[in-house]
Image: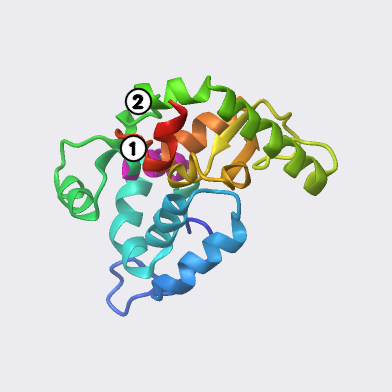
Amino acid sequence: MFWSEHALQHTLFGDGPVVVASDNLSELVRWAQQTFPHEESDLHRYMAFLTHESTQNFLGPMLIRRFGSIDDAKVPTLHWLEDVGSFETIARLTRDKDNDCTRITTRVRSVPDWYEIYNKSERCLQMKERAKEYWGKYMGSIHCSVNARHDYEVMHHSDYGRIGEGDEFRFLVPLCNDCHASVSARGPRIPAAAPEGVLKWL
């Protein structure tokens, strides 16, 4: 249905098909991590939630009515999850007939001042150079780590908690601008306060 094929089981009284999928969240998260190893952990959790049998049976019919098919609903629903922020909010919104998740779009998130300053620092530039060497050895030639057909255009911090640490370069991943915008919109937010390890570089 969402990210893998599931069986549809028709009910005895003809109330429509019921999805038969895994109901083990840890298995679904592990599957998402293996299928999309370079994506952020938030996306893996979203995929596990959306693939879960209960979610399929609850949200599936509404999404098909709204978007025409599950395939057409995938991207808007990921944006919707990012926007509403919690599963309780999602439940409330799905009960609101006036809510229209088609209005949800990927937004550019605001960047804290400390992060902009750090990105221009000599230290950050050195970390990006080390990351390019690191990925160059791994890939042979650097390209976008999400889509190998795209050129490398920007280094993305995959773990903001590692900024300022000695191995920070290991948590910089090469992306194209399009994939960077998509990953940044879905991934964890940059913390408002600078991590302790980065203060000496500001």
Q: Is residue 49 magenta?
A: no
Relative to 120, residue 186 above or below: below
For residue 109, what is the image quadrant? top left
Give the SS element for disc 1. loop
Front residue of this view, candidates 65 and 91: 91
Q: Residue at x 74, y 29 (%)?
A: 151
Local crowd size for mark 2, using a 10 Å CA cut-off: few (<14), some (14–19), many (≥20): some
Quadrant where the C terminus is found in the figure: top left
Report x, y in % for residue 135. 74, 43
Question: Is 57 above or below relative to 74?
Answer: below
Task: Return the x and y of residue 161 as percentages of the image width and height.
Answer: 43, 46
- Label 1 crowd bin: few (<14), some (14–19), many (20+), radius 10 Å: few
Give the alpha-carbon distance from disc 2 to disc 1, as whole Å: 8 Å
Classified by dominant secondary structure, the portion drawn in magenta counts as helix
Which disc, if any, is residue 191? 1
- In the picture of the structure, the residue carrying the numbered disc 2 is 112
First along the sequence among labels 2 and 1: 2
- Vertical placement of residue 7 versus 133, above or below: below
**Front-most of 95 and 179?**
179
**Pointers 2 and 1 in contact (C-beta within 8 Å):** yes
| 154 sits to left or right of 97 | right
- In this rendering, the answer to whether 25 lies above or below 33 is below
Q: Magenta part of the protein: which range? A: 72-81
Q: How many discs appear?
A: 2
Asked whether the viewer can see residue 127, the reply is yes
Identify the amino acid type marked 1. Answer: Pro
Query: Toward the viewer: 154 or 50?
Result: 154
Judge by depth and name the residue closer to the eye, 152 or 131: 131
